[in-house]
Amino acid sequence: MATFDTQYSAFVESTKNLDDYFGYNVISVAKIEPLLNFLFKYWWRVNATGFERLPAEGPAIIAGNTSGVVPWTALMAIFAMMSSSKPRKINVLIDMDWAEDQRIYNFCTEIGFVPWSADNAKRLLNNGEVVLLFPEGSAVAGKKYSMRNRVHDFDWTLFTPAIEAGVPIFPLATLGCDEIAPVFVNVETLSKLLKVKAFPISPFFPWLPFPFNLMTLPVPWEMHIMKHNEYHKPKGREEAKALAKEISFLTQGDVQAELNRILRLRHR
């Protein structure tokens, strides 16, 4: 922990006075830092840009694409923000029904995961924190390899708390997360039987035992945060609803356009 405090002193300082209502514990982040550092710098060689666009203080929303059952994209975003020029804690606001084991659930909340609800979103934003959303929802859990780098429709309702508060929403495009564990097929019958969101068949799952079935390919990543779309704070519920739909559509379009741009550069 002493080494972590020295290397990430600005990040540790920025977390000292934060609300730990959801169980956040910077010590738990320090424990997984070596793994995150290895994945980010050496295994996926993540090129993260645009994180400096986020405000140094005050609330902000990051909304982007992801893939798979394991939240690798969220973990890479946490590390990117932690080691950026303006380090801040990221709260990953997602559906956490998949974390049935209490130990896994507790550990996730300790490193910054927060179960989705409008009330939780409002609490975080009112406290001036950065919130990361993946508005594609559970559809990405079993995304086939043939659909890689195609963004599913964003759930506009997730944007409503931010719109009502007039919080800036920054699009995040991540290229590479669809390719690290290519899904050949999603066996929906088994996912329904086991009451899980997806049962993806990949080169590693379900053939290998745990934890080897979580292995990934060393595919380079690009993570780009773009400029947020300007909007005025709504005056009523109906205007907030309409704006949430508009900003959700624009943000999804920005993410897809950025993925397409990076792909064109990759294939030159």
Image (spheres, rainbow, N blue to C red):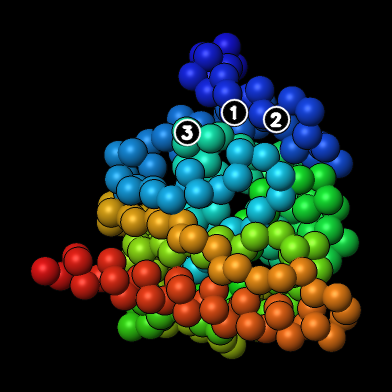
Whether residue 10 can be seen here: yes
The residue labelled by disc 2 is 15
Query: Type of residue at label 3?
Result: Ser
Q: In the shown orientation, is residue 23 left or right of residue 207?
A: right
Q: Position of residue 44 (x, y in %)?
A: 32, 49
Give the residue type that dot 2 points to.
Answer: Thr
Q: Determine the CA span between mark 1 and mark 3.
A: 10 Å
Q: Which residue is label 1 attached to?
A: 11
Frontmost of labels 1 and 3 is 3
Q: Residue at x 38, y 76 (%)?
A: 257
Separation of residues labelled 2 and 1 (CA atoms): 7 Å
| Vertical arrangement, residue 53 with respect to residue 257, above or below | above
Please provide percent x and percent y for residue 100.
Answer: 75, 59
Q: Nearer the viewer, residue 209 or 92?
A: 92
In the foreground, 114 or 63 = 63
Instruction: Classify the position of the C terminus by image quarter.
Output: bottom left
**Residue 255 percent coordinates (x, y):** 45, 71
> Marks 2 and 1: CB-CB under 8 Å?
yes
Q: CA distance from mark 3 to mark 2?
A: 15 Å
Q: Amino acid at mark 1?
A: Phe
Task: Name the residue rendered at 19%, 66% in the picture.
Answer: 265
Q: Which mark is residue 113?
A: none
Dot 3 corresponds to which residue? 85
Q: Is residue 21 above or below residue 15?
A: below
What residue appears at the point 83 percent right and 58 percent down from the top-left corner? 122
Sequence-first tag of 1 and 3:
1
Q: Earlier in the sequence, mark 3 or mark 2?
A: 2
Q: Nearer the viewer, mark 3 or mark 2?
A: 3
Q: Residues within 10 Å of mark 1 (few under 14, many from 20)?
A: many
58 left or right of 180 in image: right
At a point 33% along the width and 55% down the height, the residue shown is 221
- Asked whether residue 69 appears in the rendered view, the answer is no
